[in-house]
Image (cartoon, rainbow, N blue to C red):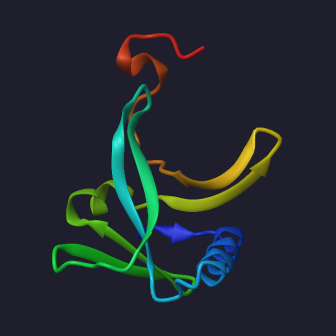
Amino acid sequence: MIEITDVAATELKALLEAEDKQDHALRIFVAGMGCSGIQYGMALDNEISDEDVTIESKEIKIVMGTDINEQLDKATIDYIDTDGGKGFIIDNPMAAGGCSSCGGSCH
């Protein structure tokens, strides 16, 4: 099951309150493919369908399609704040690949 770190939960709750979207969930979706494999996106969403998988972690509702639920089984949503920028990330130990998976150079 996907988990949210304490830092990410705090930031998400603040974001939901600041945007007056406490009734929304965090939707995770496939945003494309890259050298490291599947790239995921995240958005606030209040339209949940019967085909969606809904879970809760640290009082945050997380929604995703059934097609990616298993791919994110052991993933963690975190929040980073570095010199390079800040934002939410998904750390997925189940992700396969690496720079060599596309045959290109990621340097």
Say if 39 sits above or below 58 in the image. above
Q: How many marks?
A: 0
Residue occupying image coordinates x 48% and y 21% = 99
Q: Residue 38 in the image: state x and y as whole percent.
A: 36, 40
Q: Nearer the viewer, residue 100 or 81?
A: 81
Q: Quadrant of the C terminus?
A: top right
Say if 24 sits above or below 71 in the image. below
- Give left or right: position of 75 versus 49: right
Residue most extreme to the left: 51
Residue most extreme to the front: 19
Q: Quadrant of the N terminus?
A: bottom left
Q: Nearer the viewer, residue 97 or 77?
A: 77
Residue occupying image coordinates x 74% and y 44% = 85
Say if 95 sits above or below 77 in the image. above
Q: Residue 14 in the image: state x and y as whole percent.
A: 68, 79
- Give left or right: position of 63 versus 85: left
Q: Residue 27 in the image: state x and y as whole percent.
A: 40, 67
Q: Residue 54 in the image: state x and y as whole percent.
A: 33, 79
Q: Nearer the viewer, residue 15 or 58?
A: 15
- Give left or right: position of 68 versus 40: left
Residue occupying image coordinates x 34% and y 39% = 32
Residue occupying image coordinates x 38% and y 11% = 103
